[in-house]
Image (cartoon, helix red, strand yellow):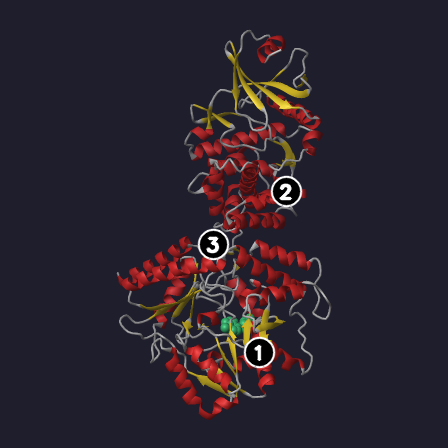
Amino acid sequence: MNLEQFLQKEFGFRSPWIKKLVGYDNSNYLIRNEDSRFVFKEYRYSKSLFDVLLAENEVLNVLKDCGFGDFPEPIPFSDGSFVKRVLIGDENHIYRMLTFLEGDFLGDTSPTLDLAFDIGAFTAKMDIKLKPLESYVLKARELEWDLKYFLRNKRHLQFIENVYNKNLVYYFFQQFQLHVVPILPKLRKQVVHNDVNEWNILLKNNKVVSGLIDFGDVTYSPLINEVAIAMTYIAYDKENPLEWAIASLKGYHSKNPIQEQEIEVLYYLIAARLCTSVCNSANAKNKHPENTYTSVSEDFAWSMLHKWIKLNPINVLQEFRTVIGLPNTIESSVKMPIAQRHKHLSPILSLSYKEPIHMVGSAFQYMYDAHGTTFLDAYNNIPHVGHCHPRVVEAGQKQMGTLNTNTRYLYDLLPHYAEALLRKFPKSLNKVFFVNSGSAASDLAIRMAKIHTGKQHIMVMEHGYHGNTQTAIDISDYKFNNKKGQGQKDDILKTTLPDAYRGKYGNKGELYAQDAIIKLGEELQTVAAFIAEPIVGCGGQVPLAVGYLKYLYPEIRKHGGLCISDEVQTGFGRLGDYYWGFEMHDVVPDIVILGKPMGNGHPIGAVVVTDEIAASFEKGVEFFSSFGGNPVSCAIGLSVLQVIEEEKLQQNAKEVGDYYQQKLRKLQEKHPVIGDVRGSGLFIGIDIVHAGTKKTNYELAQYLKNELRHEHILISTDGPDDSVLKTKPPLCFTKNNVDTVINAIDTILSNLKS
Ligand code: PMP
């Protein structure tokens, strides 16, 4: 029996007109019989699908004659059943017939905010109707598209090719775990349509919602998931998605009031729906690689995700709270948090900016404050691979829940991480000692140098900074030479900063080095170590002049001293062309100090030395650090190394950093108060001067820093006169981010002139 004969037998249709429609995972036929249109659906049989279809029909029957809109109506077969199992050949099929709804798809129109409101209201009315419906089949349904099962989509993450996109989705999985999963059991649940999107909503005259189709994803889930989905699809193709999402939320709330705890998870649920969509697209592409087609809805989902990450969740929450009439809970001033801080903490811990920022969250190159503002982080170099990078977070969380102990036990992560780290160094640097900060690393490095050489003097760089321990302060001109500092100790020998911009020999490093050697004279014999940063951070992001280290290192060694490179700021690929700062100067140190970016914010530091230095150290008292090299630190450190590699962050630092410097140089032509632009990769200093001179301009640098803060861009200042803007963003910084910074600086400086 063919389909026509079947329809004739079952429904009494005479010569029906039949057209096959494209279906997602079943076959649909559009049937016209006299004046009426129907949709005939055919599925491969499975017991569970059969039961789900019965449940779906039950839902449709509840909505029949509801009075506020049209829904497909199930049409009975001749025996009165609505879902039929039919044996065709040796295969079982399922058949069902539904009415066809007339109308225009929302997806084919340009909606207004009023329409977004109506869609919310319509969805709410439907949900009120569905509320009493009990269905154990739908309760048992497990759909990846049901947001309560969102985390199951994580297995598709691997198929997202663009690494930035992949991280975004990965981040939202973690946020879901943190913010939604604990609340899930408390949320009210009911049967929901679960797919209120622009191709399921029908309109009359392109204006009024007339009906809703496709109950194929119907399930039993938190009611707020339904709201989140409706909000997502009205918003995801818009310039300002939040505005549209809010319009839809208002409509929903006007008919079916939303609860406070539901509002609290909405930001994350909307992100979760977008992520579900892109994960499933990635999975589909993986299954069918011949299909390279990217759907329009996938593009919209990505576009909204990129916008969503830039929205401060606190701000979004407040907007949603306002919709449902809840009071504003956003902190209006930082007075209280400042007072609280000063109650127990000394003001010697300074705060950035005239108007300090109360931070509550961060993601990649964005930071969120308690006032609802999102800041573009163009400054912090500790979250090296990005704030809260999901891979690093997961590595830490996993290991913290597995084992955390000290180096007096055997655990595989320690040698494993040590090996991975040392692989990044020249062969001669082959022993590592783990500590918990750059300061502890500096301290230990000096101790080792003194033990190994038996000498006591340390040669340090003008304006250098190496940490906060007594030893580290003693070797940091930036600290001991400060107005309030302790002064230079007798065992410290200071050398002049070979500064290509202000120094007397320009970029001729060898000449500065020769001067240094002459100045040291006999004392050169007493030097245990010479320590310097390849780019002197506190000196104002000053790269040591070309050839300086190359000349100096052999001179130091000739007289029995060691050479220490402080890579706390310059290491791990930030410099773009170089993984380590010493490579920039074409030298290999005897000791390297690591910190800051090493754990992406987790406190970890290290001293890397040669075999010989380690051997001398071994002869002394035991070295032990309670936390240094613990399994959690190793897991985190290892994940940072892997992320730098896999995400090609060094290359990104090079590409974006070059672009950044090039743009800054252009800006320099326009604004002569930019005296110098220097650095490498994403380690950049902008020297602010009095126009036409090299005279440092503290006031303007501070003004710029604080104005940029008001433009929601984080940049800081440094240098002996605190007049150099420093910008050392997380390495996931983009050219777009650079443009934002450049435009802001340009505007601030241009406004000054007018
Ligand atoms: N060395 C350098 C070059 C640094 O910039 C710093 C920190 N600013 C340190 C050492 C000290 O590191 P920590 O603050 O982790 O002790």
Q: Tell me where residue 520 sits by quadrant.
A: bottom left
Which residue is tagged 3?
Answer: 374
Which residue is tagged 2?
Answer: 152
Query: Which tag, 1 or 2, sits closer to the chain's start?
Result: 2
Circle 2 SS class: helix
Query: Which tag, 1 or 3, sits closer to the chain's start?
Result: 3
* Front residue (pair 592, 49): 592
Decide: is 311 above or below 344: above
Disc 2 crowd rating (10 Å Cα; few below 14, some 14-19, many 20+) is some
Residue drawn at point x = 50 percent, y = 61 percent: 334
Disc 1 crowd rating (10 Å Cα; few below 14, some 14-19, many 20+) is many
Residue farthest to the front, as pictured: 427
Which residue is tagged 1?
Answer: 445
Q: Amino acid at mark 2?
A: Arg
Circle 1 SS class: helix
Q: Amino acid at mark 1?
A: Ala
Q: Position of residue 405 (x, y in %)?
A: 71, 66
Circle 3 SS class: strand
Q: Position of residue 164 (x, y in %)?
A: 50, 50
Q: Position of residue 128 (x, y in %)?
A: 60, 30
Query: Could you tell me how far apart the alpha carbons at marks 1 and 3 are, in whole angstroms?
Result: 39 Å
Query: Could you tell me how far apart the alpha carbons at marks 3 and 2 are, in whole angstroms?
Result: 30 Å
Q: Is the residue under label 2 in contact with that under label 1 (CB below 8 Å)?
A: no
